[in-house]
Amino acid sequence: MNAAIVVFPGSNREQDARAALQQATGREPFMVWHRDTELPDVDLILIPGGFSYGDYLRCGAMAAHSPVMREVAERAKKGVAVLGVCNGFQILTEAGLLPGVLLRNASLKFVCHTVTLKVENSQTLFTSGYEKGQTLSVPVAHGDGNYFAEESTLDRLEERGQIAFRYVGGNPNGSARDIAGIFNETKNVLGMMPHPENAIDPLQGSTDGFPLFSGLVQALS
């Protein structure tokens, strides 16, 4: 499996994502600058966490209009897997690749701690390494992770199996229906606020994020 990581000014988890992909694939991912207009031939595009453009407008709003995002959208339409983590999730919603928006945390405070997630759909490229209903220990680090969408959109996400993960045992940001991650309709695009790339080694306190990456390798190789 070949992967590319898109880097924006203000990204700060690209090296964490790089380490996770190296460990899972045994290959060096391509690092793509946001002003590039082309992407290499890859099976997975990862948009990492951080504070693209300093979050000076809405989180991800400026990054969504970077030149490379046009190509990301085209690849997604063709079925290429796209994973957005934290700020990457925000960018995917702002770019229209996922429904809804990420608002300021209900507490109006930045949250940075480990949360418990429940796997809602294990029948996808991203979650085949898990069992439905399995609980995971994964860290979060964000100030704008409060997922919001209209009730009709939330109902549609539920009906079509587009909810990937839910917070259990405590919602860190006020996200609607405890949503921590969602898919697009064809389930080749996943956006999630928690950081699976920071749960791949026992030294990090959890390895529950690694099956996401190893499952992608099995599904896409």
Image (cartoon, helix red, strand yellow):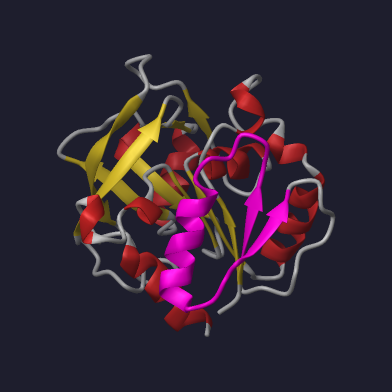
Q: Is residue 114 above or below residue 25?
A: above
Is residue 173 visible in the rendered structure shown here? no
Q: Where's the N terminus, which quadrant?
A: bottom right
50 sits left or right of 112 in the view: right
Q: Is residue 185 above or below residue 56?
A: below
- Foreground residue, 54 or 118? 54
Q: Residue 134, how many percent across, how many down?
A: 19, 61
Is residue 62 visible in the rendered structure shown here? yes
- Residue 99 lies within the magenta run: no
Residue sitting farthest toward the left: 169
What's drawn in magenta, residue-wise? 4-33
- Foreground residue, 175 or 126? 126
- Residue 19 lies within the magenta run: yes
Q: Quadrant of residue 128?
A: bottom left
Q: Residue 117, how many percent across, how many down?
A: 25, 49
Tally the numbered discs. 0
Q: Residue 172, how many percent across, how many down?
A: 28, 30
Q: At x 61% / y 45%, what residue is drawn?
A: 92
Q: Residue 132, how many percent across, how many down?
A: 25, 65
Q: At x 75% / y 70%, what residue is drawn?
A: 40
179 sits left or right of 15 in the view: left
Residue sitting farthest toward the top: 108
Q: At x 49% / y 45%, what residue is drawn?
A: 13
Q: At x 20% / y 51%, what residue is drawn?
A: 205
Q: Is residue 154 above or below residue 31?
A: above
